[in-house]
Amino acid sequence: MLGGQLQRSWSTDSVKSGKAFSYWREVVREAVLNVSTEASCDGFRARISWRGFDSLRFVGFDSTSHSLVRTSEHLSRAPADNYLVSLQRRGQSCITQGNASLVLEPGEIAIVDGQRPFRIDFPQPVSRTIAVVPRNMLDSRASWLRKISGARKITAETPFSDLIRRHLIQLADNAENLRGNEVSALTDNLCNLLAIGSARDVPPGRWRTELQLDAILAFCRQNLSDRKLSPQLLASRFDISVRMVHLRFRDVGQTFGRWLLENRLHACSQALRDSRCRAMRICDIAYQWGFGDMSHFNKSFRAQFGMAPGEWRATHEISASTALGCKESL
């Protein structure tokens, strides 16, 4: 479990315009890494907020155009045993590390090695979310990152990139509402997803057990409504044997069939209590989440929740109506 939380925020609105950029340099050093900053001081504007949990930091900033430079001299003065995970939310980032350069567009993510010199140019106003993650948290899951001399980009089309974005935004924007154990769990999931997203040259069959399992479960959740979802499909998707698929589900104390049934039933139960789905027929909800036999669905739903799907929906409609009436009477 993680220790206490450190929260800070800063804006150029709080200092005189002539001093804004020099203050920005010191704030970036404290929040992210020891770097130099370059920009025209005229009209520079920025705001930044960051939260720290032990060795983890989550940063969000918006600024006008400028550059960040980390040199060998910076490394010698302030070594950093971590990676920078950067989500581009608005504008462009041009990242150069080693002999490689890449351009980061909105929705894309870069993993930058804090132990090596780099330069990041922001040619236009920019918004970014950054996680500063200890190297061992990623290296233990993605040993291939140690062999890469430049930054690694995760495009918007990379499998599970949407989940990576959601984790980064949750940790950076909503960390004040999270307990230490929740931050720890989200960060652990984030590192697993980053390992999957950065493993484009590594066959899934060579991933370590936990990483392989996380990837399989994430894929299943994303494709829960697909009636073709099966151990055979997973084996083909992850380049492993069907037997290995069954072993991975055994690792979470389930069979594939039981895991799939429980998760589809849970999705249906959520839809049946969702006011936005009130106009949908129960059979349409069941079909939408991968059930093809209503008799099987009704029997399984009753066994799981102790009542028929129609009773479940009616009970939650009554509960919602009662809660609304209580609020209106206050």
Image (spheres, rainbow, N blue to C red):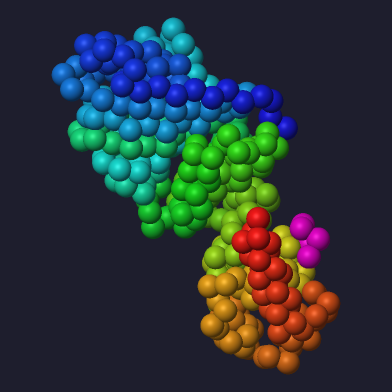
Closest to the observer: 237 or 38? 38
Image x and y of residue 25, in percent: 34, 15
From the viewer's perspective, is residue 108 above or below residue 65?
A: below
- Asked if the stretch drawn in magenta spans residue 252, the answer is yes
Which residue is rendered at x = 78% and y = 86% of the image? 299
Question: Image quarter for residue 282?
Answer: bottom right
Horizontally, residue 207 falls left or right of residue 35, namely right
Q: Which residues are magenta?
A: 250-254
Prevailing secondary structure of the magenta residues = loop
Question: Image quarter for residue 126?
Answer: top left
From the viewer's perspective, is residue 287 above or below residue 252?
A: below
Image x and y of residue 76, in percent: 43, 9
Horizontally, residue 38 falls left or right of residue 109, namely left
Which residue is rendered at x = 70% and y = 74% of the image? 318
Image x and y of residue 178, in percent: 63, 38
Note whether residue 115 is visible. Answer: no
Q: Quadrant of the C terminus?
A: bottom right
